[in-house]
Image: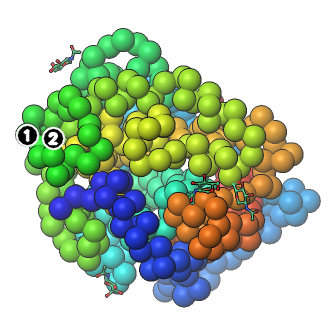
Amino acid sequence: MKINFLQWAALACIGTQALASPIADPTATNALHERSSSWDPSAWWNLWWKWFHQQQGNGGKQSCKSPLVRKEWRQLSDAQKKEYISAVQCLASLPAITTAVIGGAITRFDDFQGVHSRQTPNIHWVGHFAVWHRLMMAYYEKALREECGYTGAQPYWDWLIDTESGLNMTQWPIFDPQTGFGGNGPFVEATADQNPLGIEGHLGGGCVQDGPFAQGKFSLALGPTVNYNLSNPHCLTRDFAPSVAETNLVQSVWDEVMAEPDYGAFARRLEALPSWAMKNVHGGGHFGVGGILGTMGDAYNSPGDPLFYLHHTNLDHLFWSWQQEDLSTRLSEVSGPIVPFDYNNTVAGNVTLDFEINLFPLTGNFKLGDLLDTTGTKLCYTYQ
Ligand SMILES: *[C@@H]1O[C@H](CO)[C@@H](O)[C@H](O)[C@H]1NC(C)=O
Ligand SMILES: *[C@@H]1O[C@H](CO)[C@@H](O)[C@H](O)[C@H]1NC(C)=O
Ligand SMILES: *[C@@H]1O[C@H](CO)[C@@H](O)[C@H](O)[C@H]1NC(C)=O
Ligand SMILES: *[C@@H]1O[C@H](CO)[C@@H](O)[C@H](O)[C@H]1NC(C)=O
């Protein structure tokens, strides 16, 4: 069965011991690197030369000279939207490279979903939540560009524009079958067991019927279980819950996150709780689109919905915007628990700038401190 955030949170609270292992994996290798393991001296030379030149040009401090500029979906021309969607479809047509670790993955698109599924118990309600997902967005963007010829930056979805528009959610442009990600699934009755968050007024639950990721055109291999070694081809589902979107994806919640004084408080407020006791933009996007039965509401497998990446890029946009308010502090500050929900540090400590995360097996380890600057040595993008 699909595990939603609340069920997962219950498991996490009971089993914190089992989850205490740090996510940094000393055996992690860089699969992007492994792919070119057949020795190609000219490729290595080019890489080294590029690196060397960047160091020279920037006094050895930075290597990001012309950052990608990430834009809101509506700011893209129809041709650019089409190019992005085609690149996602391309990723979903290339063979997986993670199968030694993520046995169920079939495509390059599945690789990212599988990496998220595998680490789900360690990357939510922790200090590194915002940074881990930042890294994931950056590698997805990199794959779209380097492996599928996409020439733009990863776009984001500013849901505030939609909730403020007063349009019925089914009419939001992001769900347009021609210039967006397709719409809702048909209505499917849900049981109380499937709905621990008590979501009311869900409109869908079945397979997406139109647009580029409709049933028959697009298939997911992973989920809806937590076993990422299992291939189970199935459709993308959506289950719009307008009440969740309209109450959580609002300016006042955005402003509350922006007003947090330090990183730990910021990251905690961004995620809030796995309940509606405190409105939150993270859950608002997941459950507004995913409702009770949709892929976006699946804690492990939500990256199966291509819209996941636009939602999380907007959360990263929020993170970036918050950092811009005080760069001198916020490019070198992290905190918050290593272990999920351990906000009082009774199980383990807080993350630090040296705490390591990865997208194993897609990447090696990164220190959190190296991922705070989006125009630093490891990342190279900004927002418009
Ligand atoms: C998935 O397969 C890998 C490689 O065989 C194994 O290390 C891992 O424990 C498996 N995970 C699960 C959840 O079965
Ligand atoms: C929005 O549109 C859907 C699909 O047409 C419909 O079921 C729903 O009742 C509408 N909601 C409102 C508030 O009008
Ligand atoms: C851990 O992080 C939280 C959130 O930023 C902070 O309130 C707390 O003081 C930190 N704990 C320690 C021991 O530094
Ligand atoms: C942390 O400590 C505070 C103050 O003692 C308490 O109110 C809160 O419930 C604790 N939180 C957790 C997650 O244990």
Q: Are marks 2 and 1 in contact (CB under 8 Å)?
A: yes
Q: Earlier in the sequence, mark 2 or mark 1?
A: 1
Report how far apart the C-alphas of labels 2 and 1 lie in the structure.
8 Å
In this view, 79 is above or below 109 = above
In this view, 131 is above or below 195 = below
Quarter occupied by residue 248 = top left
Residue at the limit of the structure toward the right, as seen here: 59
- Find residue 189 and name its label: 1
Number of marks in the rendered image: 2
148 displayed left or right of 270: left
* Label 2 packing within 10 angstroms: few (<14), some (14-19), many (20+): many
In this view, 79 is above or below 261 = above
- Find residue 15 and name its label: none
Q: Nearer the viewer, residue 29 or 349?
A: 349
Quarter occupied by residue 168 = top left
Select label 2 or label 1 by which is in front: 1
* Label 1 packing within 10 angstroms: few (<14), some (14-19), many (20+): few
Q: Secondary structure at mark 1?
A: loop
Q: Is ligand 2 less than 8 Å from the beta carbon at label 1?
A: no
Callout 1, which amino acid? Answer: Glu
Q: Secondary structure at mark 2?
A: loop
